[in-house]
Amino acid sequence: MIDQASGKPLRNPLCDLLGCDVPILLAGMGGVSHWELAAAVANAGGYGILGMVRESPALIAAEVTALKAATDRAFAVNVIPSATEPRLLETQIDRCLDLGVPAFSFFWDVMPDVVARVKKAGCLVLHQVGTVEAARMAEDAGADVIIAQGVEAGGHVHGRSPVFALTQAILDAVRVPVVASGGLATGADLAKALSMGAAGIQCGTAFLATDESFAHPYHKARIVEAAGTDTVLTDVFVLNWPKGAAVRVIANSVTESLGGAYLGHDPDALPREAIAWDDDQPRLRFSTDSPLRTTTGDLEAMALYAGTGAGTIGDIVPAAQRIAEIVAGACDALDRKGVA
């Protein structure tokens, strides 16, 4: 499991496949995982994933170009085929392939034709899923890595199973490497994942609260202040996504107004009211938009994505420091178990 001779104590076959030093993946958070964060994670030995969900081909080109200038490490681009207009998706993938993007990270419904297209071009495919059935579909479609997303995850959550139970079930069902994701932010989490046979972990919230993340400082501060029990799973932040697409967020005035009825909201019944802006682009109450560095307005009422691991995050630090802390904690935990 662990290659001590390399001088990189957590390096394993997943690292060899992806081209990283430690099996810690950056979640491809839309709006947040821009080139600066992806490069910082990659340069610190982790695996950087650009969050380019529904972004224009021009922005993708700018982000990939900036990322390549900031690191020579491997990376992936995250898009969500089933939540993207088909013509935009086609141009997104075209641009990525033209730029020599080496890997894609997909999420939500498995679309075998999309997986096949990028695999034919020689790219690696990581596919995040929320069920065992979806994991099997993704493997059958050609995915090289399955990311098992537990219900503890921040942002959009596809399944409803706890992360380690889902990870174990998927490990039993597929042959490709499996990465655990959802509320994971510490070295103990990584050690537990590796000990059960997972290939690594993917972290979102832990990297959102870093210097390099493109999240607004207000969002970062709310994560530092939050306990895991301060997060709720709701589908009220659903504008721009299909009905029933639940997200995990830090409770705020919007969720508190629901009286505990967090699920079952129809996007067609929700008002379209601008409460914030990114330049001249309005951000609507109940939309999936989270506050970014460029956002102004009523940030408190926006979707403040966070997983249950927020309770373990007590400060905002450089991404490299976050990785170093996770690695040190994992090595200590594995040493105590006699694994390392």
Image (spheres, helix red, strand yellow):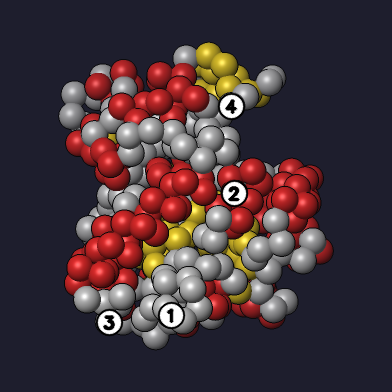
Residue 40 numbered tag: 2
CA neighbours of label 3 inside 10 A, class few (<14), some (14 to 19), many (20+): few
Callout 2, which amino acid?
Ala
Q: Dot 3 lies on which element? A: loop
Q: Sequence-wise, which precedes: disc 1 or disc 4? A: 1
Find residue 79 and report its image quarter: bottom right
Residue nearest the observer in this picture, 44 or 270 = 44
Query: Disc 3 or 2, which lies upstream in sequence?
Result: 2
**Residue 259 placement, left or right of 97:** left
Tell me what residue is drawn at x 19 percent, y 24 percent. Answer: 259
Residue 57: percent from left, percent from top: 75, 49
Badge 1 is on which residue? Answer: 3
Q: CA distance from mark 4 to mark 3?
A: 41 Å
The amino acid type found where label 1 is placed reads Asp
**Mark 1 to mark 3 CA distance (whole Å):** 24 Å
Write the residue at 20% across / 36% down.
Answer: 229
Mark 2–mark 4 distance (CA, rounded to whole Å): 17 Å
Quickly name the residue at label 3: 172
Which of labels 4 and 3 is toward the front? 4
- Label of residue 293 in the image: 4
What is the three-letter code of the residue carrying label 4? Arg
**Disc 1: CA contacts within 10 A as few (<14), some (14-19) or many (>=20):** few
